[in-house]
Image (spheres, helix red, strand yellow):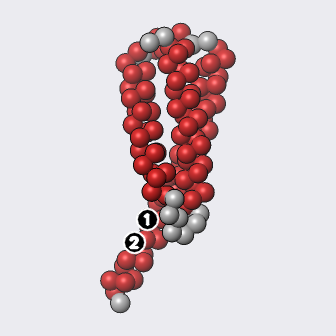
Amino acid sequence: MNPNVRAQNLIGLMEELVDLLERENALLERPRARELGPVVEEKQALFKLYEEQIHAIAEEGSAFGAALEPDLRERLRATGERFDDLARINERKLKVMTASSQHIVDRIADA
C-alpha cells in the first residue's frame, strides 16, 4: 500500500481512537456508567485495527516515513501525540477505577 494512503488510514483510525478515548475518559468520571461496556468493546476493536496498521508500517521500516509528504508526516505526528496523551490519561483513570473497585471488594471481604 502507498505510504501516504497508509498514513491517511492510520490518521483516521487514530482520530477515531482519540474520540473514543475522550468519551471513555468522560464516562470513567461517572460512577457506574452503564454506557461504558459498548465503548470498551469499540475500543478493543479499534485497537486491534490500530495494532495491525502499526505492524504493517513496522514491516516497511524507514521507507514508510521517508515516502510521506511533509504535511502528512506533520498530521501523523500531531495526531499521534494527541492519541498518546489521551491513552495515558485513560490508563491512569482505569488504574484508579480498578484500585477503587479492589478497595471495595477488600472491604466487603474483611467485613
| Other residues around mark 2 within 10 Å, as few (<14) / some (14–19) / many (≥20) | few
- x and y, in percent, of residue 37 in the image: 45, 57
**Type of amino acid at the residue the image marks with label 1:** Thr
Tell me the element at label 2.
Answer: helix
With 30 as the anchor, is 106 left or right in this view?
A: left
Q: Name the residue under label 1.
A: 98
Q: Which residue is drawn at 41% across and 44% down?
A: 44
- x and y, in percent, of residue 39 in the image: 49, 51
Q: Residue at x 53, y 64 (%)?
A: 33
Residue 102 disc label: 2
**Type of amino acid at the residue the image marks with label 2:** Gln
Q: Taking 55 as reference, is 109 above or below it?
A: below
Q: Can residue 96 be seen in this view?
A: no
Residue 60 disc label: none
Q: In which quarter of the image is residue 27?
A: bottom right
Q: How many labels does the image show?
A: 2
* Residue located farthest toward the right when viewing the structure as drawn: 71
Tell me the element at label 1.
Answer: helix
Q: Which residue is drawn at 43% across and 27% down?
A: 54
Q: For the C terminus, which image quadrant? A: bottom left
- x and y, in percent, of residue 97 in the image: 48, 65
Q: For the N terminus, which image quadrant? A: top left
Q: Is residue 37 visible?
A: yes
Q: Taking 102 as reference, is 109 above or below it?
A: below
Q: Observer-nearest residue: 6 or 41? A: 41
Q: Taking 62 as reference, is 37 above or below it?
A: below
Q: Do the residues labelled 1 and 2 touch (CB within 8 Å)?
A: yes
Q: In which quarter of the image is residue 98?
A: bottom left
